[in-house]
Amino acid sequence: ALISLRQLLDHAAEHAYGVPAFNVNNLEQMRAIMEAADRTDSPVIVQASAGARKYAGAPFLRHLIQAAVEEFPHIPVVMHQDHGTSPGVCQRSIQLGFSSVMMDGSLKEDGKTPADYAYNVDVTRRAVEMAHACGVSVEGELGCLGSLETGQAGEEDGVGAEGTLDHSQLLTDPEEAAQFVTATHVDALAIAIGTSHGAYKFTRPPTGDILSIQRIKEIHARIPDTHLVMHGSSSVPQEWLETINAHGGEIPETYGVPVEEIVEGIKHGVRKVNIDTDLRLASTGAVRRFLAENPSEFDPRKFLKASVTAMRDVCIQRFEAFGTAGQA
Ligand code: G3H
Ligand code: 13P
Ligand code: ZN
């Protein structure tokens, strides 16, 4: 059944687990997530970015998610809009049937320029008013994703800020977070702790100076009743990088957010964990390997099946590690 983010995260807080939020763009990702949820008896959050709407088209995306609800009626599903850049974008998603939206007011409407606090409060409060009137949940964001190693904002051509950010923008301030939640009434709050979108998060396995789980603890201590959200939470599995590079890929050395660190965050108020890159890496690795090992094969269902299986196994691992398994 389709449920709101608030319903799911309240349950997650009560039972002390976290929920991975996987990005969907196509049938294969949707199947992978739902088969993993079915096998582990997990509730799911599927989220669609602006890029996903551009790729698949809004009607296909909507019906893909509704098809998941229809085929797996016993699994609670949150249909979430990822990184909305204005109240208008959120409104259109609500009209499409999403049960949850993210109003990312940490950035201006271009999705790139860091916004100030007053702007963020204004757009987020407006989105919340509209969404709550429709029974839809809202995730806000305070602080900008970006690297504490380099001060660089998000991915080059992905979702996220551009340019250089200072330390105070890269780590959400606990006191400001408390004010923000009071002023906006968001259902969940995305925070900045040194992660960024995409595969190139850290040049070395992260330590506390570049990935601040400590900051999560400080924010949770200040606003214990607010559901916290971690963006840029792919773990960038080294074995998938090796598989990709062993079969013609060229991905330089890079590191993601270790699963153990996310599990530590879940002990301190993190309830939603955004993951996109890990499924992309698993899918690409599986397809590259399949085609290299089966050079005469040309039926796309064969290599896409390999992709689904690889993504499904990543989802199962996250559901189990985050305590989502068994909670459907
Ligand atoms: O927020 C970032 C997600 O990874 C979505 O990426 O805009 O390429 O679909 P995308
Ligand atoms: P990753 O790029 O680490 O998978 O993060 C995805 C995300 O935060 C989507 O909003
Ligand atoms: Zn994100």
Image: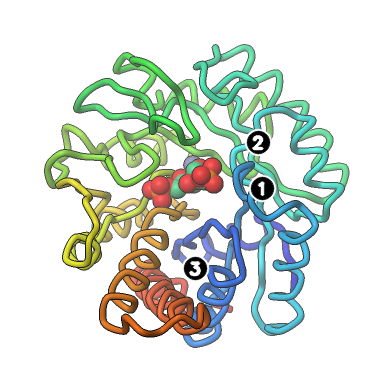
Quadrant (top left, top right, bottom left, bottom right) of the N terminus: bottom right
Coordinates of residue 235 in the picture (x, y in percent): 29, 56
Task: Pick whichever, 71 or 209, lies toward us.
Answer: 71
Between marks 3 and 1 in the image, the one whose residue lies nearer the viewer: 1
Tell me how far mark 3 sits from mark 1, CA to CA.
25 Å
Tell me residue 275's x, y (percent). 44, 55
Residue at 31% across, 80% down = 295
Q: Are marks 3 and 1 in contact (CB under 8 Å)?
A: no
Instruction: For mark 2, give the secondary structure.
Output: strand
Q: How far is mark 2 from mark 3, CA to CA?
A: 29 Å
Residue 229 can be seen in this image? no
Q: Are marks 1 and 2 in contact (CB under 8 Å)?
A: yes
| Structural crowding at the residue carrying mark 3, measured as other residues with C-alpha within 10 Å and reported as few (<14), some (14–19) or many (≥20) | few
Q: Secondary structure at mark 1?
A: strand
Q: Amino acid at mark 2?
A: Gly
Q: Relative to 245, say whether 155 is above or below.
A: above
Q: Residue at x 40, y 84 (%)?
A: 297
Number of on-image labels: 3
**Which residue is tagged 2?**
84
- The x and y percentages for residue 81 are 66, 47
Residue 245 visible within the image: yes
What's the residue type where badge 1 is placed?
Answer: Gln
Residue labelled with disc 1: 81
Q: Where's the C terminus, which quadrant?
A: bottom right
For residue 246, side relative to residue 155 (left or right): left
Lower position in the chain sequence, tag 3 or tag 1? 3
Whether residue 215 sits left or right of residue 67 in the image: it is: left
* Quarter of the figure with residue 315: bottom left
Q: Which residue is mark 3?
A: 15
In the visual, does 123 lie left or right of 247?
A: right
Please, what is the three-letter code of the amino acid marked with disc 3?
His
